Image: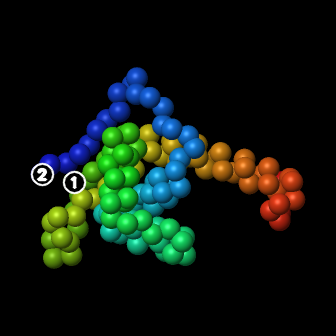
Amino acid sequence: MNLRSRQPPADRDPVPQPLKPLVFLLLVSLAAGERHGYALKKEIRARTGGKVSPGPATLYRTLAELLDLGLIEESERRPAPELDDERRRYYRITSRGEAAARAETQRLSKLVRLARSAGIVPGTA
């Protein structure tokens, strides 16, 4: 089995911030558990009410970038063969990916607090 699993070297460049929306959505989806590409597409579409629905080229190019950055890795775990297509690749988030998602969540939370304090978003600051 040819699995892409890359451990980032200690001197690897930091993850670009802010994260692109699709990158953030993929990391959030994978934080909930391992998924294959098509399941990720369906989950993102559902989570965004259909507003984000990446095409195959965009989805798999972004997954390749996340693999290269060490934010995700391919998983060896597979469901029962009768429930699976052997061509599917399953992905899981890495600790580096979790850290990037947490940092992005904090960044977005600060922006929402600023908007609330300016009266743009209802709620308390």
Residue at (44% x, 45% y) in the render: 97
| Mark number, residue 76 | 1
Does residue 10 appear in the picture of this structure? Answer: yes
Given residues 61 and 83, the one toward you in this image is: 61
Give the amino acid at mark 2.
Met
Residue 105 position, x and y percent, is: 61, 50
In the image, residue 63 above or below residue 40:
above
* Residue 7 vertical placement versus 39 (above, below): above
Give x and y (percent) for residue 51: 54, 71
**Residue 28 in sight from this viewpoint:** no
Task: Residue at 53%, 47% (x, y): give it.
Answer: 19
Q: Dot 2 surroundings within 10 Å: few (below 14), some, or many (20 or more)? A: few
| The quadrant where residue 96 appears | top left
Residue of label 2: 1
Depth order, front residue of 100/59:
59
Amino acid type, mark 1: Glu
Residue 89 drawn at (x, y percent): 24, 59
7 or 120: which is nearer to us? 120
Mark before the other along the chain sequence, 2 or 1 = 2
Name the residue: 79% across, 54% down: 115
The span from disc 2 to disc 1 (Cα, nearest Å) is 8 Å
Q: Residue at left 65%, top 45%?
A: 107
Is residue 56 toward the left or the right of residue 27 in the image? left
Q: How many marks?
A: 2
> How many other residues sit within 10 Å of disc 1, few (<14), some (14-19) or many (≥20)?
some
Mark 2: secondary structure: loop
Labelled pair 2, 1 in contact (Cβ < 8 Å): yes
Q: Is residue 57 left or right of residue 97?
A: left
